[in-house]
Amino acid sequence: MRASIEVADIFRAAGPAYRAANAGHLSLAQLKVMSAIEHCRTAALGGHVEACENCGQWRIAYNSCRNRHCPKCQGAAARTWLAEREADLLPLGHFHVVFTLPAEIADIAFQNKALVYDLLFRAASETMLTIAADPRHLGARIGITAVLHTWGSAMTHHPHVHMIVPGGGIAPDASRWISSQPAFLLPVRVVGKLFRRLFLTRLVALRDADRLAFFGSLAHLTERRAFLRHLAPVQGTRWVVYAKAPFAGPEAVLAYLSRYTHRVAISNSRLMAFDETSVTFRYKDYRRDGADRQ
Ligand SMILES: [Zn+2]
Ligand SMILES: [Zn+2]
């Protein structure tokens, strides 16, 4: 069994020398992350007493840093997130729905992250709510848990939204529950079409309001005609929406999403050893099959 090593141990041991050697090359943000990880759950951040009201047992717990990059905090945050999402699940079938942006749009999103990711979320959820409410389809008000992913498994920019959607919804007059068919929620072609229309209309509106910025190879898109020409190929193509009842249940999808949502550069469990000169950690080489490497 390996001794349990944490990123914090390595930072505390080698951090001061590293900072001295790289003075001027580390950003304030990087220094803040290092400091947060080094002090997480130590006396430096203060503490509190946790006590059981029933048996009277108590212990002192040090406060955590809650930094987005801290492996200790994100591991705990992922477990909390997963438990809360699992508690949201209803005792019935769920669907896994994925909305993906075409490559031409992903390029624009990359240079306008906040606005275009927000638009992706809104257009996708509005599409689902609208078509589900349509009496020709489900005719009910549905609930959605949605998670934004901006990177694909090949580590390329690939913005898409995952949704967990219960197989049914509440009738418009709130009188009853309306169930979907077990293997069919909504027609994906209809969903894809409305998503494309809502998304593109609003993207053009953002450009017309001068809210989008373009750099480098996309710099010419500030011109309206060039922008519309850039969008032309995706106006006529099918925007693929994936919607299926997950084979291993919604829990498996949520577990996958929680790992992505709370991902840090390296989790503590991958660290194997460290000394004055080197750190040994496990990694997976996705270009080769299976086994973990060091
Ligand atoms: Zn922390
Ligand atoms: Zn994803």
Image (cartoon, rainbow, N blue to C red):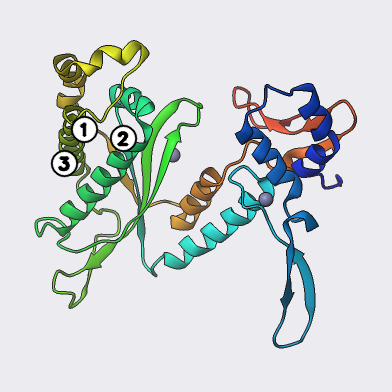
Q: Which mark is residue 194?
A: 3
Among all residues in the image, which is located at the extreme left? 136
Side of 282 where 145 appears, left or right: left
Mark 1 element type: helix
Q: Of label 2 and label 1, which has the lower sequence position? A: 2
Q: Measure the C-alpha gap from mark 1 to mark 3.
A: 18 Å
Q: Residue at x 25, y 61 (%)?
A: 142
Give the amino acid type for the residue marked by disc 3 in the picture: Leu
Which label lies toward us, 1 or 3? Answer: 1
Position above or below: 238 against 228: below
Among all residues in the image, which is located at the extreme bottom? 54
- x and y percent of residue 93 in the render? 36, 62
Q: Residue at x 21, y 32 (%)?
A: 206
Q: Of label 1 and label 3, which has the lower sequence position? A: 3
Q: Residue at x 36, y 25 (%)?
A: 111
Disc 3 + disc 2, Cβ < 8 Å: no
The residue lying toward the viewer, choosing from 229 and 42, is 42
The residue lying toward the viewer, choosing from 8 and 123, is 8
The residue lying toward the viewer, choosing from 265 and 19, is 19
Q: Of label 3 and label 2, which has the lower sequence position? A: 2
Name the residue tied to disc 1.
206
Question: Label 3 crowding class (10 Å Cα cut-off): few <14, some 14-19, many 20+?
Answer: many
Name the residue tied to disc 2.
116
Q: Which mark is residue 283?
A: none
Disc 2 + disc 1, Cβ < 8 Å: yes
- x and y percent of residue 287 in the render? 60, 22
CB at mark 3 closer than 8 A to ligand 2? no
